Amino acid sequence: MRRIRAAVTGAVTLSLVLTATACGGGEDSGSSPKTLTYWASNQGASLEVDKKVLQPELDQFEKETGIKVKLEVIPWSDLLNRILTATTSGQGPDVLNIGNTWSASLQSTGALLPWDAKNFGAIGGKDRFVDSALGSTGAPGQDPAAVPLYSMAYALYYNKQLFKEAGIAKPPTTWDEVAEAGKKLGAKGKNGIGVEGSNLSNNIHQVFVLAKQHGADFFTADGKPDFTSDGAVAAVKQYVDLMAAQKIAAPGNAEYAQNQSLSDFAKNKTGMVLWQTPSQTFSAQGMGPDEWGVAPAPVPSGKPGTGKQTNSMVAGINLAVFKNTKNLDGALKFVKYMTSDEEQIALNKAYGSVPPVKSAQQDAAFSDPSLAVIRDTLATSAAALPQVPEESQFETVVGTAVKELFADAAAGRPVTTESVKAKLEKAQQQMPKK
């Protein structure tokens, strides 16, 4: 180890909350091979936390290579629009983080560097990365548009104190058991499960998984939108019915945005949440590691796997390079550094995520049982969101449809198969025509 990363660990332990369950050529770096610009996604409780986490790592990179990295941490609410603007203007960073679900959409712009055998060779080879993470790096049959940086998956987190008070002996493994546990929690005056109805990306993550469990997808095999199939409609209705029919999600959750469900969970108001990250997330909300438990997200049979037993999307962050960077050699060195075993261990440990690099996963830092659930999910029962150019539009229009249905549920308006299908038909009409 080059050094003990006290700055990383200290900054994160105090205030880290992961956000989530989302490219030009260096605005002024092009003239100097000694400078790179880097857009990082907001992984922490604030932009300042991310700066405290990342800056020591960037300083070490400069010490080793002589290349200074100019860091900008960008909120998720702005990141995609900033990237899309950069793809058209040509004015952007050298290296940037992207939500892995955007990989194919951004790949289709032609602005990102393709990761062919030569470029992968420059960072140690493609086979260093876990297959499930590579599955969210671009359209099938094409060279990836990015490389995996942080890996995450959804699991079911439960409040041990509330479960004990409600007489729930073990975490649910099926959706029927989730409903049963939620009603027991409700009888004690608590919310059963937290949702974030105004969080479009989280809406997509949940209904995508439920569609898999119904034997459906939101796109056909040739990449055309298929939002109104029986399975897709059933998936959306099942998710909204946590509030509309089962009433185990509080009506106020219809207005919740990023991370608001976690606050209720930490304050002993809500018994369960489906979330992407373990201990660091809840410690930042004031929960000790003995106050919560984790189990695989529910599936119909209770045993996660592939196909109808899928229980998570492959969540994570990818690292991309703008194709028109004037410092390609430096950018490749930076990607190699960020995906090295040591950096993978340090950064994923700090953020409570799992390294997508196989060898880094073996570090003792990731042997905690809570992270084992995430690792197992990624290895055996997670599926990548559709890697199609229109994926970002899909997140917006279907995520909004789910948001509107949650608003109906919160207001006491009926949520029926017909009303769900109508919302999804409207969403499909908003997709780009091929």
Image (cartoon, helix red, strand yellow):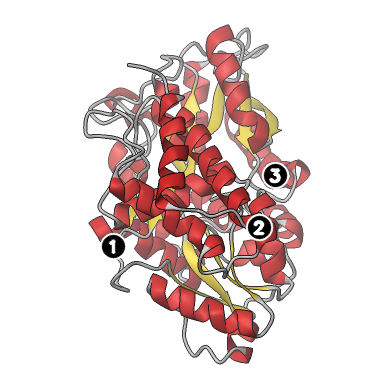
Which residue matches tag 1? Answer: 309
Mark whose residue sits in front, 3 or 1: 1
State the separation of the CA atoms marked 1 and 2: 27 Å
- Judging depth in this view, the residue of 297 and 97 nearest the camera is 297
Mark whose residue sits in front, 3 or 2: 2
Q: Position of residue 1 (x, y in %)?
A: 55, 54
The image shows residue 352, relative to residue 176, as above or below, that is above
State the separation of the CA atoms marked 3 and 2: 27 Å
- Judging depth in this view, the residue of 65 and 261 nearest the camera is 261
Q: Amino acid at mark 3?
A: Asp
Which label sits on residue 253? 2
Q: Position of residue 23 (x, y in %)?
A: 54, 18
Which residue matches tag 3? Answer: 50
Tell me which residue sits at (62%, 49%) in the image.
Answer: 407
Rendering quarter of residue 200: top right
The image shows residue 407, relative to residue 79, as above or below, that is below
